[in-house]
Image (tube, rainbow, N blue to C red):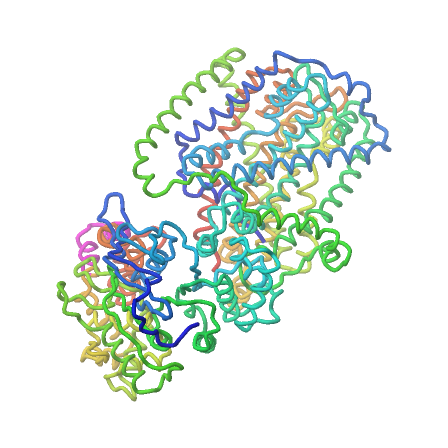
Amino acid sequence: MMNETPLQPAVAPAPLVNLEGVRQIYHKSDKADLVVLDDVSMKVDAGEIVGLLGRSGSGKSTLLRIISGLLLPTDGTVRWCGERVSGPCKGLSMVFQSFALFPWLTVLANVEIGLEALGVPKEEGRRRALEAIDLIGLDGFESAYPKELSGGMRQRVGFARALVVHPRLMLMDEPFSALDVLTAETLRTDIVQLWISGKLPIQSILMVTHNIEEAVLMCDRLLVFSANPGRVATEIRVDLPRPRNRLSPQFRELVDDIYGLMTQTVPDERPGRRLGEILTASGIGMPLVSVSTNRLAGMVETLTAEPYQGRADLPDLAERLQMEADELFPAMETLQLLRFATMEQGDVHLTDVGRRFADSDVDARKRLFGQQLLAHVPLAALIGRVLEERPSHRAPFVRFSAELEDTMSEERAEETMRAIISWGRYGELFGYDEQTREFNLENP
Amino acid sequence: MIVRHPAMEAGSSRRYVPNLWDVFAFALILTALILIYKGGHETFAPLAVLARHPVSLDPANLPEYALRTTLRMLAAMVISLLFTFLYGSLAAKNRRAEQILIPLLDILQSVPILGFISFTVVGFMALFPGRVVGAELAAVFAIFTSQAWNMTFSFYQSLKTVPEDLLEVSRSFGLSSWQRFWRLEVPFSMPGLVWNMMMSMSGGWFFVVASEAISVGNTTITLPGIGSYVALAIAHRDLHAIGWAVVTMLAVILVYDQLLFRPLVDWSRKFRVELTGTDSGNHSWLLVLIRRSRLLPAGFAPIGELFSGLVRRRVPTVPIPSASARLEQAGLWAGRAWQAAAAVVAAIMIWHIIAFVATGASWSEFSKVLALGLLTLLRVVVLTILATLVWVPVGVWVGLRPKAAERVQPLAQFLAAFPANLVFPFAVVVIVRFHLTPDVWLSPLMVLGTQWYILFNVIAGASAFPGDLKEAAANFHVGGWNWWRKVILPGILPYYVTGAITASGGSWNASIVAEVASWGDTTLRAHGLGAYIAEATTAGDFPRVVLGIVVMTALVTLLNRAVWHPLYHFAHRQLRLG
């Protein structure tokens, strides 16, 4: 029987999941090891919804897979119901961001698959599957194939499949992020409703998300993750009674606090480290996110115009632009990197340079952008220097990406290179030939 | 429409220069062949049974012959499927096995199939001396070797590209590897596998016909079937009989196309992972019939129950050991030891091969064979280019008109399936009548059956060309040569390359039956490697056969690596649409 707030028994029952000192390191043959998770300790008790909030690439999905036993950590202990985890655990099930339904099975067959693996007899399995489908609101769609369903319905199948095996803990990996806003909201409220009424045959939920409002809406406890390497930065309790109102002042205040937390410098042994920020390293090894220059220009224009006039509240901006934290933060941080804006306590302020950018025409914008890029992004300056020095004025892609891969993973390096290529072209600092994979100083 | 060429996809990450594993694989195959021959050479008895019921030219026998031919084909398909599942799974799941198995497969598919026959006939005949079974097995094995390789490549490639999230679902719900195999891996591979099965069968008719009447040295087999019927007709100069055989074959291919090919491909659409609801046309009437009828599903229900019961059972299978990350590191020395061992074994095998070949051939022979090989290579290249120049424009014209495409596409697939060697006698008659040079005029026969692959792939490519790109080109008045060069040709290049690879590979195989063609007691001979191998086979001169096979395989592999691999990867990397 599920309660909204956990009771306080005399003796605390063992937590469902207990992580201590978990580290995940990827060895690369001749480069420095990549630390994905660093000293993560957390637990999940029965009767609560826990959220893992963090940016993409902060290692939260890796952590989820470690908890579920799909991945074994390099270091540290993981306990499930008191026992050490050595493989996929029983009593856990997962809902995936991409729905992960088998396209060649009907909805009913998809839901039954977990039961089949458990060896549940056919008749009982069918009965339970039909119950779960009914619970989640898909009654009537049993014989449909996934390709006939919309995104929201497919995720409902994913939920039904996870619930039908009566897991003690349901893991959710960004379950609503592949859905449009309205569908996601409907599904969220449905799940919360079922949780409150005690109809979900589970004890706890652990949810990974990058949507701050969603996390505050659904969770009892929030673990805010910082990236590079991933670790639990803060834990926040959300004691608001359910069903929660997005517009209530406490809700908004909490969301505001979290926005501020994720963009604020945290007094830490490493000065200058930002919580939840990926622009942590300095020099060449600064990972960049490939935000399009159109988007950056658009944001500057939005900030200049009414009602902000150069100063905006981040959650407000996010809502207005219908952007999630994952899209907003990289763009904001890029603007900050190029000194077009600054961020303080959950607010963003346009700088003078930013205002000049907004007021200029296309050519002047490109020039300004190029100047700022050269001045504040070391990688751009390096590329420019190398191209000047070489007599042929050409430099291969791999020369720079190899240097980046010393301090970051291959995917990050690839993303950083794509960002610098796109920005460099916009700022007319250099050109790039995709066929030969070379930078050059030609202006075609 | 599937565009991927399975062998190219599977080998995509390998270097272009043959490496140790290719050499090892090469040596392994040849040694095995030699061993089979050597073992068979000892015991060897004529088949009395077949002599009692010789193949006759009476057309009334044709339906029965057609049935037997089809049965052989189906038996080979079942064996191919079993081989595919075992070999593909092993190669996909075990790193060490993969290192040897995939190059092995690559070389196997470059070996001319009719070159295999000479060895396997002797081998199987020795296994079952004096009984028909031996001859049947030899024919079935020959057909198997024409079918299995691309199916295995396709299955292997599918296993390696199973979507990560579906794998995680299987593991998190605790599916056993048996359950996972049948619930995830096989269904996921279905579209590619079924398509390749059908392509294999299409190509297989050619080899069925060629392998039913085999003469290797003193061993002559004529199994009752269409192939031997035609061989007999050729020996008796009976043009009418050949005509009847052609008609029967047309009927057989039609039946196969409508009752097997189209329903299976249609059914396999259900397994496609692209989750769009669009329903592309071309439904097989048979499948619709089966689905709508009441009796048939009821009839098949028990089989379905049995199957799902089998899948549910947690069969304790021996799990294929896969290399985990920890083992990887510790196994660095083990890996080096493995490679060293392979190198040593390869060296020993190559020594044996050379010794064997040297018993029947000398160095001058080798250079002569090489020259012949280059001549055949020239033919293959020229013919592929000619076929391209003719069929690409036609294919594009047809493909851009949906109505025409709907009618011509199945026809082209049908023609690709039809065994071209049935019509060789007509060509031979013409050449003999008009005293034409065999060297030049026998060559087109090589590409006769395989040119259709280029056609129907190009049609597929042109049909799949995005409508909005066509409209943009028209809107900006892009025409003439510009339109060809910048609009349509880059768009169909991936499809063209897939078809051309199949066509050129098929031409090599065809050269063995096309460069030596007979009519009655007139034998036309063109200078080339195919003729060399064919004649060595009939003479039972095994060292020469091995020499011929080695050279042909080397040439095919070289052509693949130097031309087709880079072109395929260029086409798929640069010219992908969307």
Displayed quadrant of residue B75: top right
Q: Is residue A86 left or right of residue B367?
A: left
A413 over B230 or under it: above or below: below
Q: Nearer the viewer, residue A77 or A229?
A: A77
**Is residue B301 shown to the viewer in this render?**
yes
Residue that extends furthest to the front in the rendered view of this protein: A10
User: Was residue A388 drawn as part of the magenta stretch in this picture?
Assistant: yes
At 75% from the left edge and 57% from the top edge, which residue is drawn? B289
Residue B74: % across, % down: 69, 38
Report the number of numbered marks.
0
At 56% from the left edge and 37% from the top edge, which residue is drawn? B149
Instruction: Tell me the quarter of the image containing the N terminus of chain B.
Output: bottom right
Main SS, magenta region, reads helix
Displayed quadrant of residue B333: top left
Q: Nearer the viewer, residue A249 or A7?
A: A7
**Is residue B496 shown to the viewer in this render?**
no
Q: Nearer the viewer, residue B501 or A179?
A: A179
Q: Is residue B34 left or right of residue A353?
A: right
Q: Nearer the viewer, residue B384 or B284?
A: B284
Residue that extends furthest to the bottom in the rendered view of this protein: A307
A401 over A443 or under it: above or below: above
Magenta stretch bounds: A381-401
Q: Is residue A135 left or right of residue A272?
A: right
Residue A46: % across, % down: 37, 67
At 82% from the left edge and 31% from the top edge, which residue is drawn? B241
B501 over A91 or under it: above or below: above
Q: Is residue A260 left or right of residue B246?
A: left
User: Was residue B526 drawn as part of the magenta stretch in this picture?
Assistant: no
Residue A260: % across, % down: 23, 76
Residue B259: % across, % down: 73, 48
